[in-house]
Image (tube, rainbow, N blue to C red):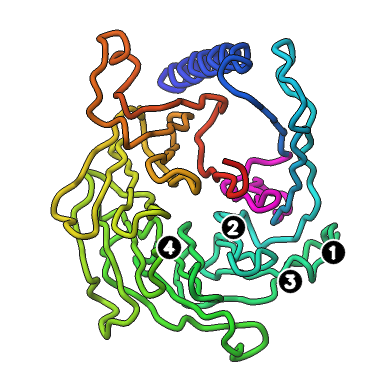
Amino acid sequence: MADMEAAFDDAVEERVINEEYKIWKQNTPFLYDLVMTHALEWRSLTAQCIHGLVLGTHTWDEQNHLVIASVQLPNDDAQFDVSHYDISGKIEIEIKINHEGEVNRARYMPQNPCIIATKTPSSDVLVFDYTKHPSKPDPSGECNPDLHLRGHQKEGYGLSWNPNLSGHLLSASDDHTICLWDISAVPKEGKVVDAKTIFTGHTAVVEDVSWHLLHESLFGSVADDQKLMIWDTRSNSTSKPSHSVDAHNAEVNCLSFNPFSEFILATGSADKTVALWDLRNLKLKLHSFESHKDEIFQVQWSPHNETILASSGTDRRLNVWDLSKIGEEQSPEDAEDGPPELLFIHGGHTAKISDFSWNPNEP
């Protein structure tokens, strides 16, 4: 009986989601200047914009791949035809590299975008130089990364390259630790590089880690222990962060430092909120952004505007927020749609949004 009820509930939810998607699709000409869609063969847990896209597969029992896709935007003079859902423009898979298990996350090195680190279902972090791999994967399915980074005991998702120190990579793990590698170090055997430092301050799964964008020795981490921690690699202690704060009322899944202000950062949580913080006084939460209906998995600041950030999660929505509108007066009708700082809701997905990426080259 319980199985029948669950199946009925799933069917109802699927109908609701499909109906929402149809409504969104019909309204895209009025919501966007440009919409381009591409159906992937398998779902991807990761996405990052470079000149194209870095993606990864998440298959059930098929071979997994690290994927590099090109994105050809339409010409500037192309007109948006309201009668068509997609206008001219192409997304094409250029390179597929065999990968050990699904790609939990993939991130390119800022100083050399050809270098890509990936998180796997094993404890290893893999590093690929995609210029050294054929565009089509070996049919044998053999995964041949350029480096194996060792130090974790379990898998994870958080991954961050230092934008100010080439080759320095941070990784967060389910084993409660954060590992730091310098990939310029000489491998001890074959292609294996051991962690330079292991940070052990959290008491639960570390969900995400991020380097500060302006200070080469500072980074932040968030975890299922509901804490935000700020670390300084110059410190002698690897078990005690410089700052620790109880950030949310549930697991903290993501964080992002503002690229324009050295003191401002944001965190996203399973408590359905995005929190705004000032490094000069972490005892006081600056603001809580509330509109998501479920767990938040990703938060990212716009690389083009210091007051704009976006967040996404299980509710299939990507919300764009504007700090400059916090506290503005609203009519009762506007208030029903969300707080004044909620700038836009992107609703084009029919499942959880695991990751997203701002285009660094296109405002």
Residue shown at 45% from the left, 21% from the top: 6
Labels 3 and 4 touching (C-beta < 8 A): no
Residue 135 vs 354, above or below: the answer is below
Residues at marks 1 and 2, CA–CA distance in whole angstroms: 18 Å
Name which residue type carries label 2: Ala
Mark 3 or 2, closer to the camera: 2
Q: Which residue is mark 2?
A: 106
Residues at marks 3 and 1, CA–CA distance in whole angstroms: 11 Å
Q: Which mark is residue 144?
A: 3
Mark 4 or 2, closer to the camera: 4
Name which residue type carries label 4: Leu
Q: Which residue is mark 1?
A: 134
Residue 262 vs 152, above or below: the answer is above
Label 4 sits on a secondary structure element that is: loop
- Residue bounds of the magenta highlight: 41-65
Residue 271 vs 291, above or below: the answer is below
Residue 107 vs 249, above or below: the answer is below
Residue shown at 60% from the left, 13% from the top: 22
Mark 3 or 1, closer to the camera: 1
Residues at marks 3 and 2, CA–CA distance in whole angstroms: 16 Å
Q: Can you give x and y, in whole percent of width and height, for residue 152 in the image?
A: 45, 72
Mark with earlier residue (1, 4): 1
Q: Which residue is mark 4?
A: 213
